[in-house]
Image (tube, helix red, strand yellow):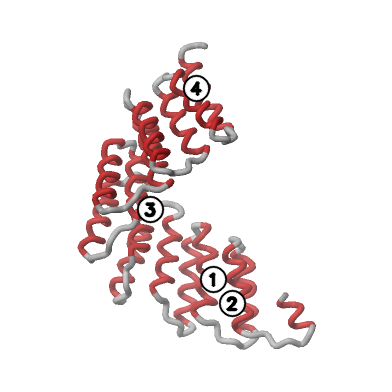
Amino acid sequence: WLRRMVNQGVPRTLGSYNMILDAYAKTDNAEACERVLQHLIDDGMEANITSYASAIYAHARRGDAASAEGWLKRMVAAGVDPDAATYNVLILSHSVKGNASGAEVWLAEMRSRGLEISVCTYTTVINVCAKSGDMSAAERWFQGMLEENVQPTVATFGAMMDTCAKAGDMVRAEQWHDRMIQHGIAPNAHTCGAMVNACAKARSPHSAEAAERWLNFSEEAGVVNDVVVYSSVIDACGKIGDAERAVRIFRRMQAKGLKPHILAYTALARPFAYRGD
């Protein structure tokens, strides 16, 4: 479309370039973003924060923190000051690959510049902790958020439960779920899925029973579960050799009209394999 504008003699504007940059960024096409942004600059236009943010975001979605930070440097060199949203994207770039130290550096930079640190920022940092199962770091950031009078959302609590799940700490995950309810926040598909996942990774003799209990809870709460959640419950059953429960959950999944994928079948086969059946 940009070429059509040129061919038809329609003047290119910063707005038209930014629309194309945004489209490429949302489709993970960082190379095209860079190419269009360079065309913009070569055309003698002054790229604004929206222009640079698209290039930064395109790399951040891939977890390419080095390239995202490289475009930040170019933006600053061009005299464009980054805002809180820009720093949030840089934190995201480290979150994708679980680089907690990198995310913390940019959060500290935000604070030093006096920028508002929102619940979205804190939740992203906690998500970094979730990828490595670093409960102490996640809880430290959660507490720091409260001390800044920033109120958690269902996504924040979901991130805390994800961290517990990664660490295989079913009991702690339940404590964070209870704390969420005490905050008056209703569970959603993410939090219920996180609880099931925590049970599946707990390797406790009671993990399968607990996973089914959370599946029941989610359905009673009106949450629409997907095949991944049911597969996680089946996985919990498989890990302790509870074949009968696994078959029951598998049939419940089919009754919901969900099509099992290979992970579900693999999890279902495990308890039978354990007993040589």
Real-space Cα distance between discs 1 and 4?
47 Å
Q: Amino acid at mark 3?
A: Asn
Residue named by callout 2: 18
Q: Position of residue 260 (x, y in %)?
A: 57, 32
Relative to 241, does residue 215 appear above or below in the rendering? Answer: below
Question: Which mark is on residue 127?
Answer: 3
Q: Earlier in the sequence, mark 3 or mark 4?
A: 3
Sequence-first tag of 3 and 2: 2
Q: Which residue is mark 4?
A: 247
Which residue type carries mark 2? Asn
- Tag 3's secondary structure? helix
Give the structural element (helix, strand or loop) at label 2.
helix
Label 3 to label 4: alpha-carbon separation: 33 Å
Amino acid found under the numbered disc labelled 1 = Ser
Circle 4: element type: helix
Residue 196 showing in the rendered view: yes
Q: CA distance from mark 3 to mark 2?
A: 29 Å
Residue 54, label in figure: 1
Which disc number belongs to residue 244? none
